[in-house]
Image (spheres, rainbow, N blue to C red):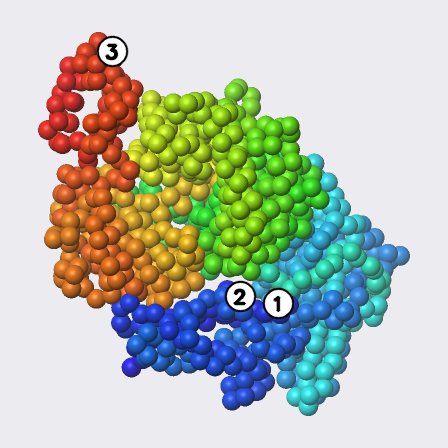
Amino acid sequence: METIKIIEVQCEYRNHLLGTDLLHPRFSWKMESTERNTRQSAYQLQVTKREDQSFESPLWDTGRMETDQSIQLPYAGSELTPCTSYLFRVRVWDQSGNESDWSAAGQLETGLQRPDAWQAHWITPDTQQIDRESDPIFQLRRSFEIKGEIASARIYATAAGVYELYLNGQPVSEDVLAPGWTSYHHRMQYQTYDVTSLIQPGANAVGAWLGDGWYRGKLGFDDKQYTYGEHRALLMQMLIRYTDGTEEWILTDSSWRASIGPIPYSNIYHGETYDARLEQSGWSSPDFDDHSWHGVETVQLSCEPLISQENWPTRVTETIQPVQYIVTPAGEHVLDMGQNMVGRIRMTLGGAAAGTTITIRHAEVLDKDGNIYYGNLRPARQTVTYIAGGAEQEEYAPHFSFMGFRYIQVSGYPGQETEGLPLDAFVGEVLHSDMPSTGEFECSDERVNQLQRNISWGQRGNFLDVPTDCPQRDERLGWTGDAQVFISTALFNYQGAPFFTKWLHDVQAEQHEDGGIPFVVPDIVGGANSAAWGDAAVICPWTFYQYYGDRQLLAEQYDSMKKWVDYIHSQGEEEFLWNTGFHFGDWLALDASEGSYIGATPTALIATAYYAYSSRLVAEAAQILGKQQEAEQYRRLHEDVVQMFRAEFVTTRGRIAAPTQTAHVLALMFDLVEPEMKLRVAADLNDLIVSNDYHLTTGFVGTPYLCFALSDNGYHQTAVRLLLQESYPGWLYSVSQGATTIWEHWDSLKPDGSFWSDDMNSFNHYSYGAVGDWMYRRIAGLDKQPEQPAYQRIRIEPLFGTRQLTHARAAHESMYGRIESGWKMEEGRMMVQVTVPVNTTADILLHGAQMEQLSESGRSVHEMDGVITVDTEDDAVHITVGSGQYTFSYPADQLFQTSYTPNTRLSELLMDEQAVDVLNRHAPQLVQGSLSSMVSTSSLQQIADNQMTRIPQEKMQQIVAELQLL
Ligand code: RAM
């Protein structure tokens, strides 16, 4: 039996990469071993042409390479040629010299690679015959002969608009809304399809449907049309390879024929109309008579360069059956999908008379009377109309639109007035970028588990090719700020590398000359340069690097990162302060003044805080990329900005000038105050929350970091109480209201059943879902270490600061393999289970454990296998291990007797000045020895909660008793 084996090989994050223009695609592999603490000591990788069918004379053979590198290895063999299929495989040796078998082969295929490889012409229907500006989708087709036995057939295609291809009556792929949405002015993706199995001997035909999509359809708040161009057009070339070695290209050119298709109308926001009576049976088959069709024109388009598909394709990833049929008080016939989802409805019907018109309207919620509510969609119609063709069986799902909905209102379905709606005739098809799931989280509180599901659904609904703010109203835009706050949570839950590679390349493409960053990317709105929004240009590549160790992406984005910081640097009169321009501020924070969306935290404070943070990240990126001088330059800039932040926003005694939760959160998270002031700032933040009866007031900027700021500065229990807070405002409020996705506002739906407003009220908005990052990293304790990205060095440090949660577990499928961290408190014992992939190291911090009472799989930690070092650190045992699965167990009662919350130092505090300061503010009577001033019960409870672990039980009781006398 093999000791070590390869369980997965990848090229550019995929097992099968079809159609890439990258010249040096990168390989990664995951391993498994029967032994603990296994590292790779050497690898050998081979790449061969697929047609060779064997690795006997590979194109590239690395030979045995003595290194532990097992991810992101760039291809360095002789030049990859266009339109060529390759196989690759790898074998490895571990540190004891054990050798693995060769892995199963992965596949890699190049695309057209060079712009001049495009011989096809963009085509669009002849303007004399078909009004190119009309709404209906176009059908385009041509037939062709296959003259011999074929070895392979590939299609390379794209469209100005959105397209579907058919070959001999069959759909060419399952992709939806191809070519996807990029900054078309700068770059457009093309797709590669393997159509070998669809080609038949003799006569063949290829056909396309062409809709408006993002390219030309109404888009944006003001329903602007022709965003990228006035005409739809198709570009396609098909490569036929015969077994005799000859090749033939079928191209879009003037020989194609065109007609109007059965879709009179389709639009991203408004839905689609399909008239089955207009279907032309067999239109993409070779024997179809197209003489009544019209000619096409070739046109010039400027959407170069064409790039091979970077993102995952958009596909149906799940189907959902409606759970309930409702007739609302207003008499609407409604189906409840049971889940706020994004995608479309596939409907079947049988025996309907031709011309029967069925309308489906989509909505996210019912109003307080139980009627369907469309108000928050604003002008987006999200309406699908189907006109039956009269066939025995009919089936339809929209092709070129998507909706955000939980409820559908149906009218016109045959028999619905008398028999109601048959649930099985309607299926919800969930659409999004088809990224593999990589994250799991669950804990002992079912409400939090629902929150996690809502986070994940929020991501799925808003990762439809572009990271959008919302999937339902007339917006659905790539808001940079939202993407920035959510990216870390997103990359934990799903394999987001291809998704963000594409989007970040668009961010770079749309960056202004002066370094400014648009509010939305792809930019169709025009505004730019808000702090925390523009910082996406820096924070997203950085977070990406943390997850995937992808230096190439970091290097590609580096100039853009730098330019953004330089842009900030050039603003206003004060070099190190950013106090000019418009900012969204702490968007939608609850401390906003009446009528404003912008929270109370001064925008100059937020802007300067992000200025500091982004310069620091640029310095770190420069360091990693070996740019010492620039690293130094941005480090200095960072220091200057931090000094300026202190001068402007922090008092000499460590008070943050703005009394908002968000201001404190940023100061703590971005290290903007002197280390010794942190304690005070954290206590003040805690106070702001406790005095608000454990409720947050933060918006888009403060919320993502709020719990981190608390947990990492001694107030983990407060953070957990915030998470578990069920009353408004808090994460579980929406859960208690039955939410199945994350809402845009803390009170999108108010306790009395009314809505926040019609104006800007999405029920599927991932931003506040950014709390997931903290749940995975602090509650479950599955964290990274920045010095060794991609989880090459893992940090496992669950915080158990409250008895309210009795277990939690997270898992993440990293570049190296599956990592798990789970804990359970049971019968007085804490059990911590950890899985560490081969070729990685984990630092495991077990709070409240004592060496003598700690066991691993029944043995003392000194006897366990896989351990590298064991140490005691403050109140924790710190064990460094290599790969393997570990189960630790220790008495849990110690957790609540000894100190364990990191940075909580009340026992020391009680003896020093700062303690006096803390107590002075929380319970002045204790310090002054007088009972004259009142102390709020909530502050007292908070001191008790947070410091219980530090203050001897007896003393605590005494304090509580004394205060109860008040
Ligand atoms: C709205 C949305 C979006 C936010 C912008 C500023 O359109 O709430 O999420 O980023 O405003």
Residue type at numbered disc 2: Glu
Residue 249, position in %: x, y?
74, 77
Q: Please state, as top left, top right, bottom left or bottom right, where the C terminus lies in the image.
A: top left
Residue in the image at 24% along x and 59% along y: 869
Q: Check the image and report above or below for 946 versus 357.
A: above
Residue 586 appears left or right of 867: right
Question: Taking the image as drawn, is residue 345 in sight?
Answer: no
Packing grade of label 1 (10 A; few <14, some 14-19, many >=20) is some
Residue 895 appears left or right of 427: left
Residue type at numbered disc 3: Ser
Choose between 931 and 243: the one closer to the eye. 931
Q: Secondary structure at mark 2?
A: loop
Residue 149 placement: quadrant: bottom right
In the rendered image, which residue does mark 3 sit on? 933
Residue 276, position in %: x, y?
67, 57
Residue 258, position in %: x, y?
79, 63
Question: Disc 2 and disc 3: Cα gap in Å?
Answer: 64 Å
Mark carried by residue 22? 1
Choose between 365 and 189: the one closer to the eye. 189
Asked if marks 2 and 1 touch (Cβ < 8 Å), the reply is yes
Residue 152, position in %: x, y?
64, 80
Packing grade of label 2 (10 A; few <14, some 14-19, many >=20) is many
* Of marks 2 and 3, the one in the foreground: 3
Residue type at numbered disc 1: Leu
Mark carried by residue 12? 2
Question: Disc 1 and disc 3: Cα gap in Å?
Answer: 70 Å
Q: Secondary structure at mark 3?
A: loop
Choose between 559 and 363: the one closer to the eye. 559
Query: Which mark is first along the chain, 3 or 2?
Result: 2
Q: Is mark 2 within 8 Å of ligand 1?
A: no
Residue in the image at 80% along x and 66% along y: 121
